């Protein structure tokens, strides 16, 4: 097996006395597509935000290519540039055009030249079908369009792994499909991804591994077939039956 | 041109405007200069203060960094409280006569005026800027951090442009307040509009007439400035519409995804 990109070891996060994550352990290898499912409040999003150090974990380690990025000596901003994140609420920069949203990280963080950034942005905006909108501002776009631009922005950084935090939860139902299609294409290209989602059918079809979280722990993990067709944990069964019956 | 003061109100006003027009204009020019330069420097001071006030400090930062950031915030708090809490007229007296009585440095009254207005505006703008920075959605910061921006880059490219846009109306307010409040600088003999208005009023005992002219000039200055600032806001907001960078008008409307190998109409099956 190839070298792990990310190793999460005994990760914990508490907000005050509230332990949101308790002893999370898993490993991400190149090409893995990990879907994380679970009820609201089970710690899925917190886990994802901890992986990107948007929330600083209270304990444990995150090893990136063998280095613990939670060590004070290690540079978190440089690490974040390699771990892309797509948010539920898009978080596009409102003061910039679609094109500038995609190029700013390439020019200012990766310090590449403008022409290169422009080309890269056009390539990924074309991939998500948003290249006609390069001059538009985020407020002029629909939710689905914004999310596709946000995915292009993350891709422009050419990340080693891409994190999706409920990428379709803030979208109107008719726009969910266009965003999921983009993610599906990325999956086919072999992009390493961790996807927190409530779209069960999508998680089952697209991922190579599924993690079910419950009350801050990984209650069950396995292949999507295993989790969705033959769950072992009674909590997983209960959670899935609620979803599958609807 | 008559050299005798007319009897009627309108006549007196026209007479004063005719004979002392250049004095009023010189006063208006100085008023505008002090207000513009003072507001500009005040905004700069305020931006810097606001940025320092919002530097995040976490337990993971080194002890010296935490100490200096806290010290800087304390100093700025004292500055803001003092200059917001005392009248600008008093500040002008303290500043100007402080130098004259206790140092050998003699600032010109105009320079003293600009400095006092700048420092005073800075104290208000510091709080406004702090509010402006907080008003920008937290998601913007997270989006910037997620692509690896440092705190400084996040501020410079993402937060400040939006914060400054949000506080534009307040910057306009400050400019207009400053145009009017430079009038208190007449206590340190700055020859601005108020100073000239009083001088002319005293010459012929035409207080009401002279200050009618003064008020009209103030009103013109503030009105023009407020309209210009509105135009600036519109400019920052950018165009209401955008051009699609495609020649195909049917391409990619909302909700469509482009599939590379989708069969087109007319393609052979």
Image: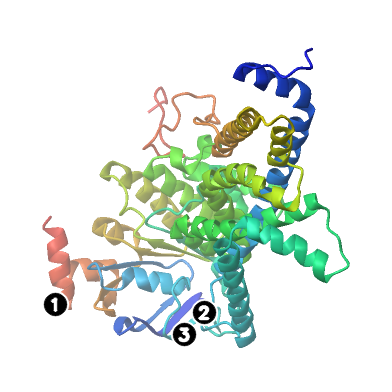
Q: Classify mark 1: helix, strand or loop.
A: helix
Q: Position of residue A53 (x, y in %)?
A: 48, 73
Nearer the camera: disc 2 or disc 1:
2
Q: Position of residue A203 (x, y in %)?
A: 30, 60
CA–CA distance in space, label 3 to label 2: 19 Å
Nearer to the camera, B223 or A188: B223
Q: Classify mark 2: helix, strand or loop.
A: loop
For the residues labelled 3 and 2, say whether their Cβ atoms are less than 8 Å apart: no
For the view shown, which residue lies furthest in the right direction?
B104
**Chain on which label 3 sits:** A
**Chain on which label 1 sits:** A
| Residue occupying the point 37% across, 28% down | B269
**Chain on which label 2 sits:** B
For the residues labelled 2 and 1, say whether their Cβ atoms are less than 8 Å apart: no
Residue B100 is labelled as none
Q: Residues within 10 Å of mark 3 (few under 14, many from 20)?
A: many
Quick check: A205 left or right of A107?
A: left
Q: Is residue B222 visible?
A: yes
Residue B58 is labelled as 2
Nearer the camera: disc 1 or disc 3:
3
CA–CA distance in space, label 2 to label 1: 41 Å
Q: Are callouts 1 and 3 both on one chain?
A: yes
Q: Position of residue A149 (x, y in %)?
A: 48, 47
Q: Are callouts 2 and 1 both on one chain?
A: no
Residue that label 1 marks: A234
Q: Where's the N terminus of chain B, which quadrant?
A: top right
Nearer to the camera, A231 or A199: A199
Quick check: B178 left or right of A218?
A: right
Above or below residue A131? Residue B135 is below
For the residues labelled 1 and 3, say whether their Cβ atoms are less than 8 Å apart: no
Residue that label 3 marks: A61
| Residue occupying the point 58% across, 45% down | B177
């Amino acid at each position: 097996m190839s070298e792990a990109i990310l190793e999460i070891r005994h990760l914990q996060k508490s907000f005050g006395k509230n332990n949101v994550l308790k002893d999370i352990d898993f490993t991400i290898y190149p090409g893995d597509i990990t879907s994380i499912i679970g009820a609201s409040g089970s710690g899925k999003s917190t886990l994802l935000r901890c992986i990107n150090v948007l929330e600083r974990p209270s304990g444990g380690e995150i090893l990136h290519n063998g280095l613990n990025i939670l060590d004070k000596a290690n540079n978190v901003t440089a690490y974040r540039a390699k771990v892309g994140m797509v948010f539920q609420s898009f978080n596009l920069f409102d003061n910039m055009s679609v094109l500038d949203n995609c190029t700013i990280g390439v020019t200012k963080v990766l310090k590449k030249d403008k022409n290169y950034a422009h080309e890269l942005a056009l390539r990924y905006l074309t991939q998500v079908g948003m290249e006609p909108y390069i001059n538009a501002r985020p407020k002029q776009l629909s939710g689905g369009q914004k999310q596709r631009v946000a995915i292009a922005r993350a891709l422009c950084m050419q990340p080693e792994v891409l994190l999706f935090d409920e990428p379709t939860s803030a979208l109107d139902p008719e726009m969910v499909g266009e965003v999921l299609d983009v993610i599906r294409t990325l999956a086919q290209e072999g992009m390493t991804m961790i996807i927190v989602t409530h779209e069960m059918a999508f998680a089952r079809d697209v991922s190579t591994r599924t993690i079910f979280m419950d009350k801050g722990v990984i209650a069950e993990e396995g292949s999507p077939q295993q989790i969705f067709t033959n769950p072992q944990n009674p909590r997983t069964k209960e959670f899935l039956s609620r979803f599958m019956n609807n | 041109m008559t050299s005798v003061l007319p009897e009627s109100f309108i006549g007196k006003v026209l007479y004063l405007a005719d004979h002392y027009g250049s004095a009023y204009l010189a006063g208006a020019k100085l008023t505008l200069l002090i207000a513009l330069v003072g507001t500009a420097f005040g905004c700069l001071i305020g931006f810097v203060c606001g940025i320092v006030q919002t530097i995040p400090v976490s337990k993971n930062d080194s002890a010296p960094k935490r100490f200096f950031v806290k010290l800087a915030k304390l100093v700025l708090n004292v500055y803001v409280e003092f200059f917001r809490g005392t009248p600008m007229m008093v500040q002008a007296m303290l500043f100007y006569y402080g130098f004259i009585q206790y140092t050998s440095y003699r600032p010109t009254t105009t320079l003293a005026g600009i400095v006092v207005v700048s420092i005073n505006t800075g104290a208000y703008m510091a709080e406004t800027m702090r509010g402006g920075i907080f008003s920008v959605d937290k998601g913007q910061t997270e989006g910037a951090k997620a692509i690896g921006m440092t705190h400084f880059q996040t501020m410079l490219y993402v937060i400040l442009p939006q914060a400054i846009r949000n506080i534009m109306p307040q910057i306009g307010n400050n400019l207009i307040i400053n145009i009017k409040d430079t009038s208190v600088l007449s206590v340190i003999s700055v020859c601005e509009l108020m100073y000239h208005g009083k001088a002319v009023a005293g010459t012929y005992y035409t207080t009401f007439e002279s200050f009618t002219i003064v008020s009209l000039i103030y009103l013109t200055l503030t009105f023009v400035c407020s309209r210009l600032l509105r135009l600036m806001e519109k400019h920052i907001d950018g165009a209401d519409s955008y051009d699609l960078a495609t020649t195909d008008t049917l391409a990619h409307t909302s909700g469509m995804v482009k599939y590379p190998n989708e069969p087109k109409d007319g393609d052979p099956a």
